[in-house]
Amino acid sequence: MIGWIIAIAVVVILVLIYFGMYNSLVKYRNRVEETWAQIDVQLKRRFDLIPNLIETVKGYASHEKETLAKVVEARNMMTQAPADGRGEQMEADNMLTGALKSVFALAESYPDLKANTSFIELQHELATTENKVAYSRQLYNTTVMTYNTKIESVPSNIVAKMGGFTKRDMLATPEEEKVVPKVQF
């Protein structure tokens, strides 16, 4: 009789541990999804600012069609990237970031554009959004690292395999952003 009670207690404890670990893994997976959604929100915000920026720049630098075309092309890539294709979305995001840098570099050649209130406000909004994207990417990577560590650690890795939890990829910094700019005086 005591043997059965002990056996049942052990089984109940093991089941409770399993459910606790499973729920913990679900919580971490949901955090990964939530942090990705935050990146998506910031990318959408930037996406919505771009048409206004293009129209403002067109008024001052209409013959800079190639630069503006790159921005439009990169923006279109963002719309065509699949919602679940994080790699494709980040590739399009990196292309858009590079194109926007070119637009802001144009302002140096056009003093009237540089002084335009709308351009200044858009530049500020986009810079703020870029900072939010960078922060969101960092938070996403931290969350993914925590999640991946959890599903690879014993004993939760057993529960992860049984529950179908899979490792997530962290976001990488584009190679061109890793290059340290030379400062010359």
Image (cartoon, helix red, strand yellow):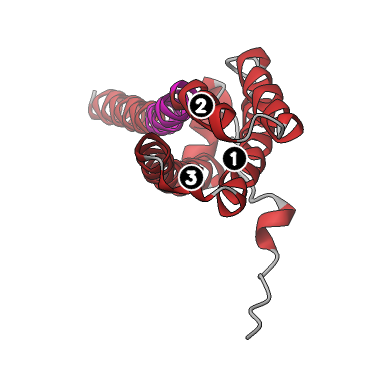
List the residue tagged with mark 3.
Answer: 112
At mark 1, the secondary structure is helix
Q: Amino acid at mark 2?
A: Ile
The type of residue carrying mark 3 is Asp
Q: CA distance from mark 2 to mark 3?
A: 19 Å
The span picked out in magenta is 29-48
Q: Which residue is mark 1?
A: 100
- Which residue is at 59% across, 40% downward? 100
43 sits to left or right of 172: left
Answer with mark 2 or mark 3, whichever residue precedes in sequence.
Answer: 2
Circle 2 sits in a helix, a strand or a loop, which is it? helix
Q: Nearer the viewer, mark 3 or mark 1?
A: 3
Name which residue type carries label 1: Leu
In-front residue for pair 120/48: 120
* Front residue (pair 58, 9): 58
At label 2, counting other C-alpha atoms closer than 10 Å, the crowd grade (few under 14, some 14-19, many 20 or more) is some
Residue 3 badge: none
> Could you say where residue 149 lies in the image, as x and y percent from the top left?
51, 48
* Overall secondary structure of the magenta section: helix
Residue 95 drawn above or below residue 15: below
Mark 2 — residue?
50
The residue shown at (35%, 39%) is: 117
Compared to 132, does 88 lie above or below?
above
Q: Position of residue 79 (x, y in %)?
A: 61, 15
